[in-house]
Each structure stands twice: as C-alpha cells, then as structure tokens.
Amino acid sequence: MDESGHLSLIKMKTVFLNGEYIAEDQAQVSVFDRGFLFGDSVYEVIPFYQGVGFRLDEHLQRLAYSLEAIQIVADYDWSAILTRLVDLNGGGNLSVYLQISRGSAGRRSHIYDANMIPTVFACCNPIKDIYDAGPDSIAGVRAMVTDDLRWGRCDIKSTGLLPNILVMQQAKQAGVQEGLMMRDGLLTEGASCNVMLVEKGVIYTPRGGAEILGGTTRELIRELAANNGIVMQEADIDYARLLAADEVWLSSSTRAVVPVIEIDGQPVADGKKGPLWAQMFELFTRYQNDLMNG
Ligand code: PDD
C-alpha cells in the first residue's frame, strides 16, 4: 500500500544468474565469490534497441578476449541468454550488464584452482533511444582532466574499477560530468568511455593497446568515418593538444557519441556542440535505425 492507500505494484526485474532467470530479489551470490573479494571478474555492457543486440558480436568478441586474458572458461550461448533476458524484461531499449567472475571456492585465497565454476550474472537497465530523441536532446558534457591511476591491462574489461569510480566521484565533486585520464602526459580515455578529438576536420583518438579499452563504439565510429570519407587516426594527445581541439567527443555503448563542450573550465572551441559531431551523430543514429529496421 502507498500513502494514499492504493496497492502499488513494484515490477520486479528479472536477472540471469548461473543458468536461471529469476526475480532480482531472489538472486544470491556467495560472500566468498572472487568477484566480490578480489574484483576477479570481467564484464560487458551491451545495448539492445527494440529488443535487438547492438554490435553484439563485437561485444562478445571482447568478452571472449577478457575471459581468455584472465583464464576464465565460461561456455554459454551468450546471444541466446541475453536476448531472452531482454525479452523477459519487456524488450525495447535496454542495456544489458553481463558479469562473469571466477566463482567461489568457499574461502578467501589469492591462489585459485583452474577448475572453478564461474559465477555468471546479467541484468538490464533502461537506455535512451537517441535516434528518436535526436541531436538536440544530447547535452554537451563538461569534463575535467585527471591522472590515470589504473593498472597496466586496461584492455581487459575488468570489474576492478576503483580508479574509475574515484575519477567519476572527483568529477562529480568538481561539478562536471566526466573525468578524462592522462598517463605519462598523454590522454588515455574517460572513466567509462573512449575519447576522440577533431582538428581541421580530422578525428584523432589515443592509440590502442593495453592502456585503454578497445571500445566497440569507438570502432563503429572508425567504420562510419571510413565509409563516409572522414579521416580518423590514432595519435599521441597531450594536454595542450586536447585543450586546443576544435571538438572533443566521448563514446560508449550507453552514451553513443557525445560532445564535450568544456574541459577544466575552458570552453572547447566556442563551447558549443561541433559540426563534425552533429554529422557523426547523424551517421551513428542512421546506422542504428537501419540495423533495427532490417
Ligand atoms: N564502459 N573505456 C572504458 C574505461 C569503459 O568503461 C568503456 C565502456 C569504454 C567504451 O567501450 P564501449 O564503446 O564498448 O562501450 C571505454 C561501459 C559502458 C560501462 O562501464 O558502463
């Protein structure tokens, strides 16, 4: 009952846990799970639009890469599982969070047995339909630059995100929406996104490698640029270059491509969303829409 005496129905979400589709309040994981104790786990965040996985193969390839890198063997039909989970949660536009930890040995020990049974967890969250909402609905992001204090294998999509969450909290306390990280004087990525900048119509993005995550959205932007005669290159980007850019963008599965309008209190160019961003947003949402409509 709510305050006015009406019966309020709270719709329980369905989650996937170790082979079962269950209500979220029924899902339980051991306190000895190594994901909980050590962050010994990897994850993916995969958007589904109108119930269909977006760049699903690319996400599953990266998942396989992360699992292999930390030697977890988990043989599941991910595509079938996630599609069913999205259906059970009403379909539409949802992002799926999928986490696989090494599992629990019933005790805490740094050493693990090779034959442990992984814990597999997936849940859904609502995601904005940027195609219908259009470019005017996308707010320019204010960002700050901070040190990249992460480990040396940021190419693995590990749940060990303490440095990332501290950066996001630092950004929040500074009244901005994103922290851009720099290591040894060079831009790496955002706390939960890749970064691109534009100079004289050319897109530049930090070099791929162990220092950053190989973003699926960044790869799509690379493809869209190549197919539309826009040059995109990897480069070393220092602080001065970042602040002097004509445009700066962020990319991730949950945000697609968003413009940065201010960095460390300085406007990016004229402090407005840039024209190449508007073009890329259009290419991106058109690609998305074509894919969803077959
Ligand atoms: N983050 N870099 C980092 C550190 C990220 O956490 C992410 C994604 C990306 C972009 O990857 P992709 O384009 O494949 O989503 C880059 C997800 C969305 C998250 O942690 O919620």
Image (cartoon, rainbow, N blue to C red):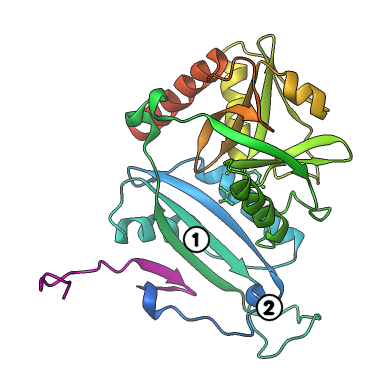
Question: Magenta span has 113?
Answer: no
Q: Residue furthest right?
A: 184
How far across and how far down the image is residue 160, in percent? 69, 62
Q: Residue at x 68, y 78 (%)?
A: 37
Q: Could you say which quadrant of the image residue 179 lies in?
A: top right
As drawn, 179 above or below 110: above
* Along the viewing direction, whichever of 4 and 30 lies nearer the viewer: 4
| Image quarter (top left, top right, bottom left or bottom right) of the C terminus | top left
Q: Is residue 294 among the parts visible in the rendering?
A: no
Q: Could you say which quadrant of the image residue 114 lies in?
A: bottom right
* Magenta-highlighted residues: 1-22
Report helix, strand or loop for mark 1: loop
* Along the viewing direction, whichever of 65 and 265 lies nearer the viewer: 265
Q: Residue at x 71, y 18 (%)?
A: 245
As drawn, 20 above or below 218: below
* Inter-mark Cα distance, 1 to 2: 27 Å
Report helix, strand or loop for mark 2: helix
As drawn, 166 above or below 2: above
| Image quarter (top left, top right, bottom left or bottom right) of the N terminus | bottom left
Q: Which residue corresponds to mark 1?
A: 77
Q: Residue at x 38, y 77 (%)?
A: 25
Q: Could you say which quadrant of the image residue 272 lies in?
A: top right
- What secondary structure prevails in the magenta region? loop
Image side of residue 117 versus residue 9, left or right: right
How far across and how far down the image is residue 107, in percent? 70, 90
Image side of residue 232 versus residue 97, left or right: right
Q: What kind of residue is marked 2?
A: Leu
Q: Is residue 252 among the parts visible in the rendering?
A: yes
Q: Which mark is residue 37?
A: 2
How far across and how far down the image is residue 100, in percent? 59, 67
How far across and how far down the image is residue 65, in percent? 69, 53
